[in-house]
Amino acid sequence: MTCPPLCYGTGPQGKNVIVFDLECSRGHRFEGWFNHTGSFEEQNAQNLISCPVCGDGRIKKVISPVATCTLRSEVQKRADTPSIDYRKLAREIVEYVNNNFENVGTEFAKQALKMHYGIAEKKNIRGSATEEEEKTLRQEKIDFFRIPLPKEEGEEEN
């Protein structure tokens, strides 16, 4: 499970940091400041993080009860951030999927199963599947996700 960070902001040397709430195996909670989201995992794997209270090295991220950031630079950055154009973002996602995933149509489940079992070369595919086919893919532990995409020009409406 990935826990959300407490906040993003600027650390003491003016570098961007991410702040996580951490907890040792003895229940002591403290915060850790990291250069990027993967820093915690890297440092924890190398046993470089320890509890400032008891020195315990078995540390995990915990969900923060507070989801606000009090760093002034972050508050200012949020105020300066333009709002997201969700329609543009949706168009970009559709364009990316259309350009980078082969449309296998109603053969999606069959192709996914073939790739899963090494019968076909693995590649990015898109298409459609029935509820029963989706159930089979889940039972076979094949990861997939649904993205509602508009029909391409020339495609029939069902």
Image: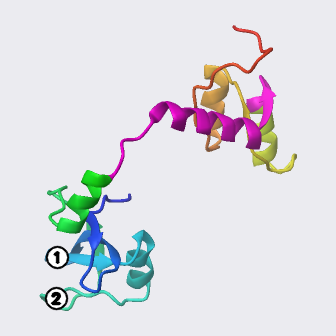
Observer able to see residue 24: no
- Mark 1: amino acid: Phe
Q: Is residue 104 magenta?
A: yes
Residue 70 shows in the view:
yes
Quadrant where the C terminus is found in the figure: top right
Q: Position of residue 66 (x, y in %)?
A: 15, 57
Crowd tier of the residue under label 1, counting other residues whose Cα lies within 10 Å: few below 14, some 14–19, many 20 or above: some
Highlighted magenta segment, given as a residue range: 81-108
The residue under the point 60% across, 38% down is 93
x and y, in percent, of residue 57 in the image = 28, 87
Q: Indicate the quadrant containing the N terminus: top left, top right, bottom left or bottom right.
A: bottom left
Q: Residue at x 15, y 57 (%)?
A: 65
Amino acid at dot 2? Pro
Q: Which mark is residue 107?
A: none
Magenta-span inclusion, residue 121: no
Q: Residue 113 placed where, x, y %?
A: 76, 39
Q: Quadrant of residue 91?
A: top right
* Lateral position of residue 2 relative to residue 140, left or right: left
Q: State the residue position of label 2.
A: 52
Q: Give 35 or 104, whichever is nearer the viewer.
A: 35
For the residues bearing labels 1 and 2, Cβ distance under 8 angstroms: yes
State the mark number for residue 30. 1
